[in-house]
Amino acid sequence: MSIQITDAIIHQINKTAQTKDSGSVTLNARQDCLPKDELLDQLCKSLLDLYTKNANNNGTLGQDPIEHIFPLRLRSYVDGQTAFIPFTLEALNLLKTRMEGAFLSTGGYALFLRYSADAHDMLLVVMLKLKAGAGIDAETLSLTKTLNIDLSHLHEAARINVTRWLAGQQPYLTFIKGRSSANDVSEYFRDALACTGYTDSKHHTEAIIRAADEFVDSRADLDSVGKQIERIAMRQRLYDCLSSNQTEVPLATVAAAIYPNDPQDFIDHIRAKAVDGGYHVDDRFKPHKPTFQKLHRIKERFGSVQIAFDVEDVREERVKYDEQLNAVILANPPDRLKEALKENAKSAN
């Protein structure tokens, strides 16, 4: 995926360790944008690759005009009423206020990045941390202490698909959230940006089924017949998985049912599709029973006619579709049904 950087800036946030008061956070704000050079390109590429792998929740921006200030500031910026740097400074102060109330939160460097990718306008906000390292002095060849951006741990980050947001297409927000709500030190970050979880179980279940079908279809190790056989088997495994975890199911568990040989391969498939409006699936979600039930049972109504049968009936050819007749064929119907049809038919033919 190629990206085109529009604007980027970094501000520093200093936080006194294990404090919770109005004086615990100080800001060191940059006054101009970062230069668009090779170094920025390399950082952004590495950061976005890592973010894609770690973003595990989807959502929307809160709509309370009193509680949720960030979406109002974002709208002003996107509409051209506020310039990029003033917008980031307003957002920085929102982060500062929330961080002051979070005892375990730590400081860092807030990166605001606006870029385009695959015809989508994107805004990424992420807290970067530094880690101590070692370098080499080119003249003396001695070791020197260095501070490097630590991309190995990414806990406070959110990305808004501005294109989808403006078009009213949900979900348009992805963010990183810890697996456990206990001691979640990044909650202040999501609160500051008004990140609201997208919990529509039907959306998640439909997305999983679509992604699973496409994943099987994309497998290069299977021919057309093998894909059809695997799709049938996969759908049965997926149904068993979702029906056994109706309260909540981890994405990792679903992935193991879809592709037991390498579950992470399926998760990577989903994450790679998230940017362009493909699949937006949380790290955990509640399966939507009426949706996943379709993996097991087919129900349809047209006019006054209602039909319902198990998928297994199709596999065993007890129910078939005849393309030439454009008709559903029921094999070996019971005598009572046959007699009823004969009695009410227009002619014996």
Image (cartoon, rainbow, N blue to C red):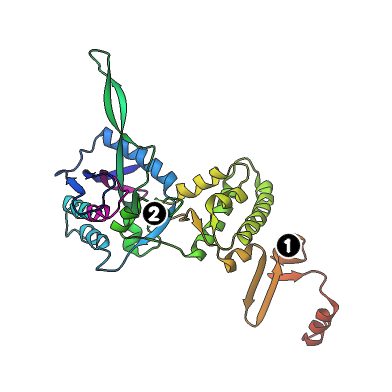
Instruction: Kindly check if marks 1 and 2 are in contact, taking CB atoms under 8 A apart as contact.
Output: no
Number of dots carrying numbers? 2
Q: Which residue is mark 2?
A: 174
Q: Nearer the viewer, mark 1 or mark 2?
A: 2
- Who's the residue at 63% across and 40% down the image? 221
Q: Secondary structure at mark 1?
A: helix
Residue 312: assigned label: 1
Q: Nearer the viewer, residue 285 or 134?
A: 134
Q: Is residue 227 left or right of residue 96?
A: right
Mark 1 crowd level (few <14, some 14–19, many ≥20, 10 Å Cα): some
The residue stretch that appears in magenta: 94-120
Q: Inspect this view and state whether residue 1 appears.
A: no
Identity of the amino acid at label 1?
Glu
Can residue 116 be found in the magenta stretch? yes
- Who's the residue at 75% across and 70% down the image? 329
Identity of the amino acid at label 2?
Thr
Q: Nearer the viewer, residue 250 or 221?
A: 250
